[in-house]
Image (tube, rainbow, N blue to C red):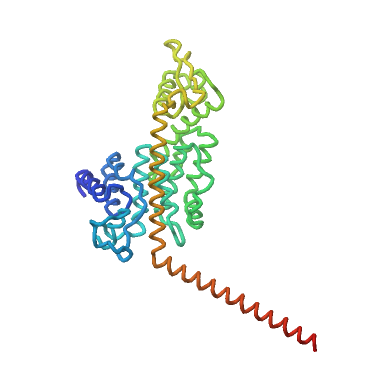
Amino acid sequence: MEQPVAAIRPLGAAILRLDPSGSCFTSTHLVFVRLCLEARTFRAAKAVLDKDVYEFPSSAKMLPNAQLPCSHHDTSSGFITDKSELSDIITYRDPLHYFLYGAMIYMALKEWRRAILFLEVVLTAPSKSTASQIQVEAYKKWVLANLLAYGEVPGSLPRTTNSQVAKNVRSLGKPYEALGIIFKEGISKEQDVRRLNAEDHNLSLVLQVLDAYRQFTIAKLESTYVALPLSEVGRRTSPNPDDHAETAQYIAGMINTGQINAAIEQTGDDPRSWVLRFATSLSSGPYSRTEQQQYEDLKRQVTKTAMLAEYVRETDRKLSLSKDYINWLKQKADSAISANSGEDSSMMANQLLVEDEDIMGEA
């Protein structure tokens, strides 16, 4: 498409007009996110990406009311079906691409934790044998996103990851794991992170690791010190320890973005005399929140949890009505009957053996 920007707004509006919850994945989701990525309109994509996907278009055969879109439906997959023509056929790769592109958009917006969630969806996707190239790329970005969000790489992938997939992606992502080790031990030179192949198109993310290392080094001072002169902070973390103004500006940026719960005490015009003082609790400093703010946060979490529970119940109901699940129940029941029949036959044979022995004894 020559002008992808022109299609972004109508596509996003169509997705949410059709399904305000955005919970049912359709082929339009993938087209929309790809266009946002190509046009670099990252914030426009959030209207759809921020809606959690819970399901895929249902099979019309399983839904007796599928021919009546105006009927009541518990979820959007009740009217978005494989026969409704509201979505093209979904292939195995479509949701993988969607969540990978979505993660790339969140990383561009520096929303690392949401990006990690999307990447883990790709990594834990069902797989019969080896990892796909999409999963390998997701693993590389997963390592970088964890370094940028938490300052470390988890010791293992999510437990639901296929063991063969985990083995493959870790084997192909060795340079990125090495970056995690370098980050933990201390990055002293930019060349340490430039060793990764620029052909992976992750160089811009890799270079952000340099700045992230400095940020996490400053944040770790909070666990040791209550207050520290800016000159000392610069000596420990700044590439130019003598530039105290740059150190003060850098730390002020971290405070404004909520990366550290602290304040700069200015006792004069000379930044060398300024002191970085960390807040002693979450009830003070930039992280402090009023009771009303805490209540609103709790209310949002409760609403989100209740919505998730509703989707789980609906998924469980659909599973219990599926043909595969009913066949599995029948096979389980038949196996139980066969096992019981075998036990009954064995008990009868043992009883007959005992009776024969008694008769032999009386004779």
Residue 239: x, y in percent?
A: 46, 26
The relative height of residue 229 versus residue 219 in the rendered view (above or below) is above
* Residue sitting farthest toward the bottom: 363
Residue 8: x, y in percent?
A: 23, 45
Residue shown at the point (35%, 37%) measured from the top left: 109
Q: How many marks?
A: 0
Residue 258: x, y in percent?
A: 42, 28
- In the rendered image, which quarter is residue 126 located in? bottom left
Residue 65: x, y in percent?
A: 27, 62
Depth order, front residue of 64/206: 64
* Residue sitting farthest toward the front: 362
On screen, residue 299 versus residue 226, left or right, reads left
The relative height of residue 341 versus residue 160 in the rendered view (above or below) is below
On screen, residue 187 versus residue 54, left or right, reads right
Residue shown at the point (50%, 34%) measured from the top left: 187
Depth order, front residue of 286/78: 78
- In the rendered image, which quarter is residue 295 located in? top left
Residue shown at the point (49%, 27%) measured from the top left: 218
Depth order, front residue of 47/124: 47
The relative height of residue 324 versus residue 73 in the rendered view (above or below) is below
Residue shown at the point (50%, 73%) measured from the top left: 334
Q: Quadrant of the C terminus?
A: bottom right
The relative height of residue 214 versus residue 42 in the rendered view (above or below) is above
